[in-house]
Amino acid sequence: MTIRAFITGLAGTTISPAERSFLRQASPWGLILFERNISDPRQLKALIDDFYSTVGYEAMVLIDQEGGRVQRLGPPHWRAYPSGAHYGWLYDRDPVLGLAAARLGARLIAADLSALGITVNCLPVADVPAPGADPVIGDRAYGDNPDKVAQIAGAIAEGLLEGGVLPVLKHMPGHGRATCDSHFDLPVVAAPREVLEPSDFETFRRLAHLPIGMTAHVMFTAIDPDQPSTQSPTIVGEIIRGAIGFDGLLMSDDVSMGALSGRIADRTTKAVAAGCDLALHCNGDLKEMEEVAGAACELTGTALARSERALAARHGADAVDLTEARITFSRMMAPTAAAG
């Protein structure tokens, strides 16, 4: 079976005839879901089942379900989860409690996702915010200390894996110093490498064993003054694969974001040429989806081996009493709620 090295979105809550034809011909590695694809549990489960049936192979279904500002599934049909900063607040009060809450919260998110057939969650966020940075990361982060962030991010990854869901480590090699939102413009970071190594890069180095990672659309001018990380062979090769030591499956952030310039096909080609194993395209625009598919290569060689290792890291959910786990989690979070 030929799989192409990209992840696609869809336009709405069902698969249109044109999208169905596209999926069958293009053979994406996976599908990523957004709020536009979701109305209620029955509809979403039917959409995901239809996707699996349409492609006919072990494709992945991804979502951004972080908690706080970034959760595609929410009330009234799904439970709301706290932001990353809440776990950081608990950690400051009691590190053991903070890590246990982060792990259990991720385990409960995994239960929600697994019930729907979602296999990959774009979490944890291991970025370390710096003073003056754009709030796009903000309270999504677990703190501003690399050790604390790495510990909490690791606990969240463990919770997801225990629930049978693959985590995605993001955004490598760091989005915490970005002074603008990469959804709309290209962040440029001028900090020297000797400043970046022990802070921004350190959290990712400590989590380099995770199966999947995502790049940041951030330009680090001291390392590559010409290309954002996603499209930089220097950043991917020397920093992500080298200094950080990540050898897992590397996906780009969304190639339709405003941080990147040029035609969608060219953005995709540059990301793959830089060393991304997969190109991510999110907006559900069929014309753009076709361009991405045309520019994405077949998943072979090292990239295929990384994909196979990542998929092998996923296993059935560990047994847990979800009712009791939710009661325990609520009790853990109660001090945070009381603090306002």
Image (tube, rainbow, N blue to C red):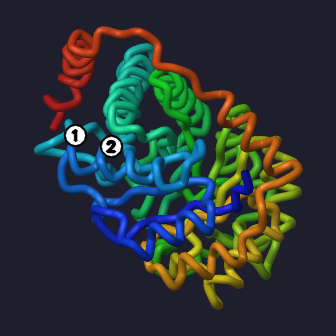
Identify which amino acid the numbered label 2 is placed on: Gly
Within the image, what quadrant is residue 319 found in? top left
SS label for mark 1:
loop
Q: Name the residue under label 1.
A: 80
Residue at mark 2 to residue at mark 1: CA–CA distance? 7 Å
Image: 193 above or below 205:
below
Decide if residue 222 is in sight here: yes
Location of residue 122 with respect to 254 vertically, above or below: above
Q: Which of marks 2 and 1 is nearer the N terminus?
A: 2
| Mark 2 crowdedness (10 Å alpha carbons): few <14, some 14-19, many ≥20 | many
Q: In which quarter of the image is the C terminus?
A: top left
Drawn side of residue 151 relative to residue 184, left or right: right
Residue 325 figure quarter: top left
The location of residue 157, given as percent across then percent down, is 53, 30
Q: Position of residue 172 (x, y in %)?
A: 66, 54
Residue at (46% x, 49% y) in the render: 53
Of all residues, the one furthest to the bottom in this rendering is 262
The residue positioned 39% from the left and 52% from the top of the image is 50
Residue topped by disc 2: 67
At x 21%, y 14%, the residue is 323
Residue type pointed to by label 1: Ala
Q: Which of 256 and 50 is in front in this view?
A: 50
Foreground residue, 262 or 155? 262
Q: Is residue 121 left or right of residue 239?
A: left
